[in-house]
Amino acid sequence: MSSMNSRMVRTGRDVEVNVLEAGVTSTPAMFFLHGVLGLLRDTTLLDLLAQHFHVFAPELPGYGVSKGEERLEDMLDFTLHGLDVLHALELQNPIVVGHSLGGMIAAEMACLTPDAIDKLVLIDPFGIWIDDCPIPDLFSLLPFEFGELFFHDSDRAAQLLPGASDLADPESLRQFVIDSTRQLGTAGKLLFPIPNRRLSKRLYRLRTPTLLAWGENDRLMPAEPYSARWHALLPHANALTLPQAGHMLPYEQPDRLAEEIIKFCVTPSG
């Protein structure tokens, strides 16, 4: 059972975000930015991390009960929003973990304010585009294709995306369509028509100690070539690929991923 609590936080732009929180206040702060499908109901990874860190996991505007998505229009807006939430939570030099869409935003935050983040963990992040291996168009997918594309384990997809399968009951399918339409409306500002906002041009600024984690079976952005390209752009990053996981690595291998994140974050920098 999850130990996460939630509260609403308002930023200086009158954006309201729901923040999940767990852990002991005396431990290092960890700021988790979710992926394009949002924070799913399984919080195993966050619960494991909360045993070692004071974890904060905000939902982007347009996701869950967070509000104010109309105020975010481009990459700079999303990056400043992340920093605004850090400020509202009064977090100084936190560890920042970003998955998928959240990884793209986390990397931009580290490029814009390289001294404001203690350590950075990027999990199957968006942000890089490779012409020879184009990322599928998320905005043309049928509901059942989300499970097939995002997860390695079809049973796990059925558990966590109950409306996104061929056998989904009508009510689950209806709710999935409603939720995903609103979420993709927010995500589309960064990912449509293609998920490329020239992040690669700015990664030279990223000097934060970084862990790059990838699901070996990511069908959305295959580890080869995407993880390899990220590592080429961030040659000093620690890079690892975890088996039996797709793009939803945090939900398919939470124990192994938590172990790697903890090991990286408790190791002194330098």
Image (cartoon, rainbow, N blue to C red):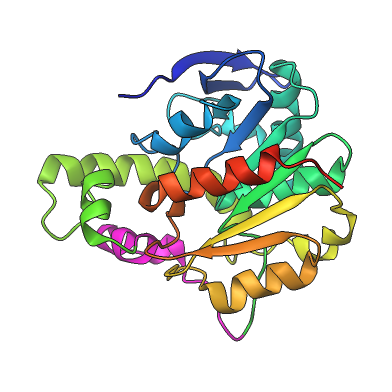
Magenta residues span 132-151
Residue 213 horizontal/vertical position (percent): 58, 58
User: What residue is drawn where x is 69% and y is 17%?
Assistant: 89
Tell me if residue 93 is in the magenta stretch.
Answer: no
User: What residue is drawn where x is 69% and y is 74%?
Assistant: 229
Residue 76 horizontal/vertical position (percent): 77, 44
Q: Quadrant of residue 165?
A: bottom left
Say whether residue 215 is left or right of residue 122. left
| Depth check, front residue: 60 or 226 | 226
Q: Quadrant of residue 124?
A: bottom right
User: What residue is drawn where x is 27% and y is 57%?
Assistant: 143
Say whether residue 173 is left or right of residue 218. left
Tell me if residue 140 is in the magenta stretch.
Answer: yes
Residue 57 horizontal/vertical position (percent): 55, 29
- The number of numbered discs placed on residues in the rendered structure image is 0
| Depth check, front residue: 198 or 239 | 239
